[in-house]
Image: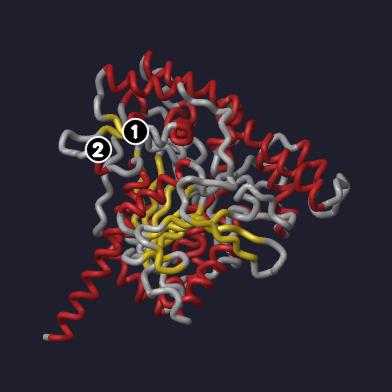
Amino acid sequence: MIMTKSLSFSPFGLLAALRVFALVSRNASMALAFSTATTTSQDSSSSKQTFFPHVKHHENDPLLQELQAKHRPIAASFVPEKFNPHPLLSNCHLQTISGVFLRKNPDCAYITDGGIDGLANVMKGLSQINTADEADETKSNFWDERCRITTNCNKDFFTADIKYAGSKKTIYQSEDSKGLVVLIHGLESNSNSSLSTDMASAYVNEGYDAVCLNFRGCCGVPNDTLGGYHLGFTDDLIQFLTMLKQSREDGTFENKPIYLSGFSLGANVVVKCLGELGSKAYTEYNIHGGSVTGAPFDAERNVRCLDAPGFNRLIYSGNFLKTLKKRAQFQLDRHCNGDPLTSAFDFPRVMKATSIGEFDDAFIARVYGFESNIDYYRKNSCYYFLKGVAVPLFIINAGDDPFFDPYFFPIEEGVDGNGNSPIKMEQTQHGGHLGFMFHQLRDSDDCTERKASWMPMELARFINHVHECNSKQVNDHLEWIYL
């Protein structure tokens, strides 16, 4: 099983891992940005892929096919950089947890000295981790502006935090930006997480404005309805994109390209959204591309990995389940008058749940109207929406991600597997879940040019690649017109 890979890599690596493992035991929920689940009595006995009629298929959409043919060469021409972690620091659990606590530490994001001094700096960073520190989700020293947006149902709200690449011109847009990147965070995360701000920094450094949408209930202020969001919840993203579309049409928002990005659950939401929109992503919403990391692809397949006996179940699932139960109790008190027999969800089963799958079956499925947790996974996993993607998309996952099935990476759906969709997929050997830490720089690399950790820089590099390819096509077309 993937969770048992090479824990005996060296005395130093083991010491570092043990330090992190101890920290995880105290606060593993902070490391999780994606919820999938263990099997329940309603689980299927096979992970065989089938056709699900709820997914909108686009095989007969000539415009989609035209856009995919146009954008495949753009995605295919991108050359990913090899992720090269220090060999003593490549363990998947060390990568996963250090990505949460050490991402902003320059001595841990990158390794410029592979000797004793460099490793000593890493150990110093590990020793200074304080999991008791909790950031105020209502405030931030990073983002320039926060907007509160009332949902279409007029009963709830979500927030958008904005980082401008230059002088503000209008809401969500600066004077000389290349475009806007809309970032979607993971489960139980928010715009103030180290990965959210690191990704935004990478995009801003490339000249793009960045906005991170905080899902309902994730901005530090409780939301106003029982539900909030889930694995495939694209409602708020679509509403936000519609707002931008209306602003372009009335002339208050310059017609610059939109790009989507996200991590873990947010990656699933982005890919699902692009697949749902099909050609409309480009023609109606002006979306020119996307880049995501930690895409879960198939939640039903990932069930066995996240809740497998051993480290995953003891540390990741067990600790995260505690936070989910606390949230359910809060929701019961706030929206159901504290009635444990409420019909809104199965509260007794929630509190007795021993796996996230049981929680999803008793809470998520009930609140959002799915038949079961399996029905929820099948109707929302982004794998089933890949064929509908019309714009260049980059997906980077780690092969040793402890939350995902290591044997399922649908490369055949992308440009490197002769798929129709303009999707570039990259699976690194190491990286854990959203980690990609301790990357060793070459002697020719300038560390001062790295404004973010390795993975956010790769995502931003792809977006810039798409932008430059599109700009070249426009310039070539204009030259042809004037010849």
Query: Do we see residue 413 in this rendering?
Result: no
Describe the element under mark 2 as helix, strand or loop: helix
Q: Position of residue 192 (x, y in %)?
A: 51, 45
- In the rendered structure, which disc, 1 or 2, sits on the residue that comes first in sequence? 1
Q: Position of residue 202 (x, y in %)?
A: 35, 49
Vertical arrangement, residue 451 with respect to residue 284, above or below: above
Which amino acid is tagged 1? Pro
Which amino acid is tagged 2? Cys
The image quadrant where one finds the C terminus is: bottom left
Q: Residues within 10 Å of mark 2 (few under 14, many from 20)?
A: some
Q: Residues within 10 Å of mark 1 (few under 14, many from 20)?
A: some
Q: Which mark is residue 301?
A: none
Relative depth, front residue between 138 and 268: 138
Q: Which residue is mark 1?
A: 106
Q: Are marks 1 and 2 in contact (CB under 8 Å)?
A: yes
User: Residue 476 is drawn in which quadrant?
Assistant: bottom left
Please give the name of the residue rendered at 43% of the width and 32% of the height, measured from the top-left corner.
Answer: 102
Q: Which residue is mark 2?
A: 447
Vertical arrangement, residue 417 with respect to residue 113, above or below: below
Please give the name of the residue rendered at 51% of the width and 46% of the height, measured from the top-left corner.
Answer: 140
Relative depth, front residue between 151 and 91: 151
Describe the element under mark 1 as helix, strand or loop: helix
